[in-house]
Image (tube, helix red, strand yellow):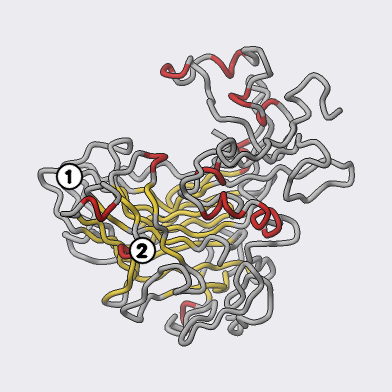
Amino acid sequence: MLFAGFPLLSHFMTPKLTTQGGFNLGGINATGQIAKFPGNFGLIDEDTPREAYTRKSYMPDTEDLVLVFSDEFNRDGRTFYPGDDPFWEAVDLHYWGTNDLEWYDPAGASTKDGTLRLTLERVNDTASNHDLQYRSGMIQSWNKFCFTGGLLEASVQLPGSTNVGGLWPAVWAMGNLGRAGFGGSLDGMWPYTYDSCDVGTLPNQTYPGTRTPEAAVSGGDRANGDVLSYLPGQRLSACTCPNESHPGPMRADGSYVGRAAPEIDVFEALVENGVGMDCYELEKGCHTVYGFEYKPGFDDGYITWINDDKAVWTITAAGMGRDDRTEIGPRPIPQEPMYIIANLGFSLNFGNIDFDNLQLPTYMSIDYIRVYQHKDKVNIGCDPIDFPTSDYINTYYRAYTNPNITTWQQFEQPWPKNRLASPDGCE
């Protein structure tokens, strides 16, 4: 898989930045319009304690980090329907890609008791819930707030208890060129983080009409012909031919930078019976800090994951280096502008569900979400110059806003020509 993500958890001082001074920051939305939201809606929440404006990096021998974004969710009664909030929007869709049992409804996301609450509940009248028996909430900062590099942390109380399995709470980030839940935007984009022009950009990571490289078609998924990958190929790769639709940028030699929608998880938590963590809804009811700190790119790039406010695991760019057997090039630690997602769902694809003992409604509560960066590497916004997204998204806006478009083919748009995919290259 050409992406970076933490293995599933089996138990699973700078001046305030203006909201009016730059594209896609704070009060300026992805269209460049200055939104009018009364109240506390700056990039840094007015309720964030001053002592939280800086913090130590989890990585040794690095400078302190400065706060660039925060939401403390202290004001009760906030909702996240489209247009309600400058940074967050709750989706209205079925997450069919993982066969979720719930419908994500904006009503499932609100603030109460000083926290963001995502509510998973049983619905009596399924006809009012798209014929699904359960309803929950997912919020996204897609195309509203993005960051590149730094630390994303969330103080979370997980839903349910440690002795009843089946819930699927998650906090995560994804590259802005793909929108979670909108399959058309994700087709050929997720979960790639790739900037090489080689076989790794092609469907199934094999050369056209062949079963080579041999390592790519052996020892993989037995249910899919032993292949290592059955992805459709990277849609916006470094092999994209000139004059094809691509968000750029273009290198001096006329080739494109490979673009995609990588994912980095803060957590996707699954409990196992007997796991002894306290910060669950039906245990002690506390909150604890989860997160990841990362440096994008090749060479000295890394991702460090945080659990219970402690660094627990790190992957470096060297761990995602070239693989000569599959002829796959090095994969960078994600360089795309990343947006934030929080959701509570469940699916039999993810694990067994203890329906007999699961108590509904159940809640994932988030006390705060904060983003920190090094003061000399502040990079926020969804349309940075070196990894632009705005023009491309506006060109294909329906794919990002209509969840019923599940593939690029269904969108009736041509797949950009890959110089390795046809005998005549880019001719």
Is residue 405 in view? yes
Q: Amino acid at mark 2?
A: Pro
Give the farthest residue toward the bottom. 39
Query: Residue 44: x percent and y percent?
Result: 52, 78
Q: Residue at x 37, y 53 (%)?
A: 170
Give me the C-alpha separation between circle 1 and circle 2: 33 Å
Crowd around label 1: few <14 · some 14–19 · many ≥20 (10 Å): few
Numbered disc 1: secondary structure:
loop
The image position of residue 52, as x and y in percent, is 47, 77
Residue 26's spot in the image, x, y percent?
58, 76
The reply to whether dot 1 and dot 2 touch (C-beta < 8 Å) is no
Q: With 408 as the anchor, is 241 left or right in this view? A: right
Asked whether 21 or 408 is in front, the reply is 408
The residue that disc 1 covers is 274
Image position of 327 (left or right of 288): right
Q: Which residue in the structure is indicated by mark 2? A: 106
Q: Is 235 left or right of 241, judged from the image as shown?
A: left
